[in-house]
Amino acid sequence: MAAFTGGEVYKAEFEPTAYLEYFKFGGGTLGDEFLTFVLKHYCKTFTSGAVTGHTLIDIGSGPTIYQLLSACESFKEIIASDYMDQNCQELLKWLKNEPGAFDWTPVVQHVCELEGDRNKWAEKEGKLRGAIKRVLKCDVHKSNPLDPVVLPPADCLVSSLCLEAASKDQSSYRAALRNISSLLKPGGHLVLSGDLGSSFYMVGPKKFSCLALTEEFLREALNATGFTVETVEVLSRADVAQHDICDFSGMYFIVAHKN
């Protein structure tokens, strides 16, 4: 998540533990389809050796870690970030292995299976906990999204389900993309994933708006912001039920590099 026009609503009403219900992997939730799709592509991207380096910044981490499980094999230092204090606190709870932290074990085991050894899941959790060095406040609508912290340009940015939730229209999405681009070194990679065609999603009983994205818009916005798109993966939604929870039509996974 990150700030948008309704950012104060997010701060007041967004409940991380309710959001994490989407990520109870293997339980037949709406999130299973999304996780199966993105975890496969994160694994392929970060284990191929094509996207690697020293520092990775995750933009709008939310209370989640799925987007970083394969990345910790390719980057020595990971910086997580989010707009909402409650998400940062939930993430820190997992990082510190505190009682009541969300159980990511099924997701971690799935990633380890994709990477070749399901039994290494505890080792993987330890490696990710060691790699995440900081959890920072982030507002993608600031020219420096991590303000007041100033960091050297990163080798890679990851952002999942963030910019579309943070942007009220295409213009603000493009502006957010420019802002996060300032955190990335020339030649560095941007790895974006999320939903296509989603105008809303439910978090418990609360409804949150979303910018409905298309593949064409994403390609255009990235090109206009000074990125070269390397790969685009798109998958149409298979689960046609539960449209009252989220109305997405498909999923995307994009790897681009900064010119």
Image (cartoon, rainbow, N blue to C red):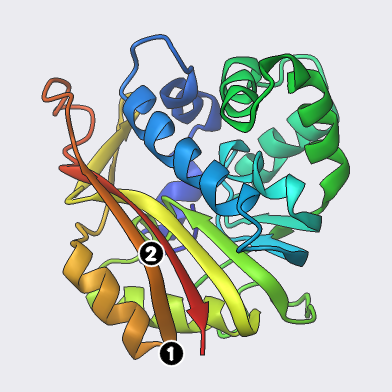
| Residue 61 % position (x, y) | 59, 49
**Residue beneath the point at 64% across and 48% down:** 47
| Residue 129 % position (x, y) | 83, 37
For residue 161, side relative to residue 145 (left or right) = left
For residue 140, side relative to residue 212 (left or right) = right
For residue 86, side relative to residue 31 (left or right) = right
Marks counted in the figure total 2
- Which residue was labeled with disc 2? 231
- State the residue in front, 109 or 62: 109
The amino acid type, in three-letter code, at marker 2 is: Thr
Q: Is residue 204 visible?
A: no
Q: Which quadrant of the structure image shows residue 205? A: top left
**Residue beneath the point at 51% across and 71% down:** 140
Residue 212, relative to residue 72: is it above or below?
Answer: below
- State the residue in front, 89 or 196: 196
| Residue 87 % position (x, y) | 61, 42
**Residue beneath the point at 43% across and 90% down:** 226
Q: Which mark is residue 173?
A: none
Q: Gap in Å between the C-alphas at discs 1 and 2?
A: 16 Å
Residue 187, relative to residue 41: is it above or below?
Answer: below
Q: Is residue 95 visible?
A: yes
For residue 211, side relative to residue 50 (left or right) = left
- Which residue was labeled with disc 1? 226
Q: Secondary structure at mark 2?
A: strand
| Residue 88 % position (x, y) | 68, 45
Residue 73, relative to residue 39: is it above or below?
Answer: below
The local crowd at label 2, few if under 14, some if 14 to 19, many if 20 or more residues have their Cα within 10 Å, is few
Q: Secondary structure at mark 1?
A: loop
Q: Which quadrant of the structure image shows residue 177? A: bottom left
**Residue beneath the point at 27% across and 66% down:** 168
